[in-house]
Image: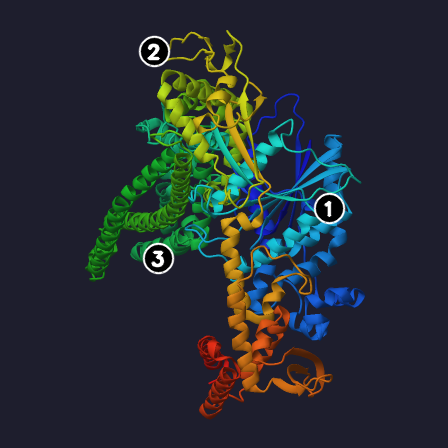
Amino acid sequence: MNHLYLGLGGAGVRVWQALRRRLACRIEPAGRRAVLEPLLIDTDPKEFRDEAPGWRHLGSSLVPPAQQRLLLGASAAELHALLRARPELRACLAPEGLDWEARLLELGAFDAPLSQVAARLPGWPSRRLGRLLLAHGQGRVRLALDAVSQALQARHTHPSLTLHLVVQLGGATGAGLLIDLLQLLRQHPPATRCSVHLHALLPQDDTAAGRPAPLAEIQAYAVLRELQAAAQEGLFELCLLSARTDERGLQPLDAAGREQRLADWIFQRVSGEPEWLAPPRAAGQAARRGEFAAFGLAERAADRVELRSHLSHELLLRLLAQLRYNHWRPGLGFVTHPRPVPVEAMDAMETLLVGWGLSEAHLQLAAPLPEIDGDSPPGTPIEQEWQALEAHYRQLIELVAPARRATELRRLFEQGLEERFRGQGIDAAFDLPDHALRRRAVVVRQRVESTLWEDWREGRRALHECGHLLAAVLADLADRIEPLRQEQHGLETQAALLWQQIEAAEQAASVRPGMLARLRGQAAPADVEALIERLREYALARTRSAAVTLTLRLVAEIEAQLTTLQGMIDAGEMELAALVETTDAAAAAALPPARPEAGESRLETRELLNHWRQQLITRETMQREHLRVLRAGLFARLGEQASFRIFAQRIGEAATCDALLAACAQRLPPAQLQPAVAGAWDAWLAGLQAEPERLAREQAALRAQAAVSLLWSSEEAPGASIQECLRVPVPPEPGEAQADETDAADEDEGGGEVAARTATRPVPTLLPADLARLLRRPGGAGTAPALQMRAEGEGALVLMRLVRGLPLQALRPVQELHRLHEAHRLQAGRAALWLQLDEAACLPELLAVDVQAQQARARTVVLLAEALGLLRHEPEPLTGAPVLVHVSLDADGFEIARVRLGRDPLEAVEQARERVLHDLFDEVCAELQSGRHGSPEAIAGLRDRMRDRIEMLRRQSPPTQWDTISRDWNEAAREAMKLIRQECPR
């Protein structure tokens, strides 16, 4: 059978999300062809966004296609055109359609959800605005329904269609669209045989959801009255109501739990074939009167959703552990702590440093970096450069007179320091700009990152080990800095001492020697050799000091770049740690209770879960294959140009986390988890057989869990009937092999192989017929539930209960809503009628009206209206007797309507009609708010007039009624004084 899910408003979206999560983990047995498609209608665009809460399950998106998400909205111009074309809709904006254009101008463009209309424009009838939106988008709704119906027929050509309409009666969108949508479905059914099943949630406060929205409960009662009229017309076949309190008077579920239970009910309806409820009626068949009902549901099965969620998160934990630590331990797999990091061999470390550009030659710029220097040869060492210059200088001074050679040598060596060393001088040779050094440092960082990234991607190192190795490199660089500084200080000191010696020698040579010595030229050669040696050592010290300074600057730049790289790696590791914490919490949340009690819905235990975690995840062959695929997928997602920075940025993004979780879930499809579900079922049956007293506890718990989610009185609903259906799987055939217990040959810690072993699945002796007999009503009364045999591998026991034919007046939640509605109707006046889609419609009263409360309110309104002068005493045309008349005037003082209330206030109260009282109450409030009666003198005058009128009524009545009239009308006067003080402006 085909099923169409039609969700209205936020509740319809949330129930579909819960239902879709169950459908994602379902295995469709062979031969079953039930098909389900959704159509979601809302006025809030936030509910349909991909990032909205609830649309993600195990990393995959559950958002239906765009053509199955219908967003209703209209601009002011579109609404204006609609109302001009359809005058009957103008009453949705203003009473009787008066001044509808002014009200539409006040509304403006409708670009907000219906739930926000009341907050933005207090007093606006948001339900009626929903009617306008549906009228405006009627064509789109019909096209969407036809498209979904045709898609269902294309998948399964079945003539029957069950339409599940989900709505929250207190929601603005659902309550505003419901009645007109039912009419639309009747006029244009989406299939030849269509059955409409309405699932209505009643608004009630609870610990999880808090209080409902303002007027939500009163609005829900107005919708129930309209549904009562719709049931008479046959607009639906079943209306399943659910509320906070179940038939036992308990409140086991909050608002979210009730939505989840409704999703579970629809899931069982969709999964059940054949349909155990009444079949859909054919087109043209006489409409059956709609029924109000309530459902109960109890399940005993392994929770496929939570089971798959737990195992998927566990697999993700293994992937994260491998990425971070890559520490394999036999029997445990990849663990979440680092392995002992081996000390890098000296030769291997030296090779890495040379390849990264961190050798001594690279730091001294003696070895080129091809990325910057290209194919240029390495520079000449400092000693060779000065040896060549010294030889050249020796040749030059041979051409100079001996007396001038010392001076010429100083000049030449100073020129060499400033200009001739490497053709530019030591300052230009070793004082490179900061950007040039930064370029070299960036190249070094890129080399280091490329090597570490490739090692990590190929699994040769873990991320933690990459950070550890980089920290060792940074420590090595830090250890080099102090010796370099000491060397620089020593060279500068040496250069200063040599320069002092050169200065002293020059001063000594400046003393004029004797004439004979000068003629002979003695002592000149020895002085030149000493001077050359000192100048050479001075030039070398100066040059080496400049080179060490340059090395220190380069080391500082490289250290800054590698520190940045280490920050990227640490950031990635921190993101992994945060993701591990979140994933571990999600995996723990999906675990079954540590100590399951009798009646626990989930049949899988933690021991069973540990066994299947070992079989499906932690076993070495399975785990390594899982992680090989997942790891390759992750790095493919990061791209070829990925880096540690990109990884740190993207691993914490929701899209990446969802993609990882979805990939893990794809490695564990529902079919692969089927043996775990069957194993939990067999273990539960074995437990029932082993403990006979446990069966009684399970029976009581199953019945209690299947309590219908609505409190009703059997005395007030004598025609209600109860239908029950018990679904159990077919027992396995004797000797059937349990394929899931066959373990592939794995290597143990000693390197040997574990032989494959095959187990035979036990056949429980507790048969489905026995379960049906044992689960009949307590005390043996009644008949056993209808039995449906399910596929053998499903491993689930489902008890479904349906109470049909419930009159609304027999429902306790409806009685509570009635009291709230009556209180609102007594206070709000005609505004209470605006909660109905059509204020002129005579809707059936679900419960008897409180006549005394209505008359008490009528006394207050009539007494105060007369005191304010809103009522006139005019002679009746035929008899001439005075009558009390209410005349309505427009803003210019002209008469609009005239209503005869009775001969006196007593008769006016007895004959008061609800709508007349609403109009009169509204005029009383408007008169009080006008400001003409707010002064103390005016209030005292109203009090005196009401007191005089009460005394007149008392004198005109028989003495036996004096006490009654005095009591009732004085109470009305007290309520009138409260209303005066409340409404009159200060």
Look at 36% across and 28% down and name the residue there: 335
Q: How many marks?
A: 3
Reply above or below: 866 against 692.
below
Local secondary structure at mark 3: helix
Q: Nearer the viewer, residue 375 or 782?
A: 782
Q: Is residue 526 visible?
A: yes
- The amino acid type, in three-letter code, at marker 2 is Gly
**Residue that mark 2 sits on:** 750
1 or 2: mark nearer the eye: 1
Displayed quadrant of residue 99: bottom right
In this view, which residue lies farthest toward the bottom?
Answer: 937
Look at 60% across and 79% down and name the residue there: 923
Q: Distance of mark 3 from mark 1, alpha carbons?
A: 97 Å
Q: Nearer the viewer, residue 349 or 398?
A: 349
**Residue that mark 1 sits on:** 144
Report whether 403 appears left or right of 631.
left
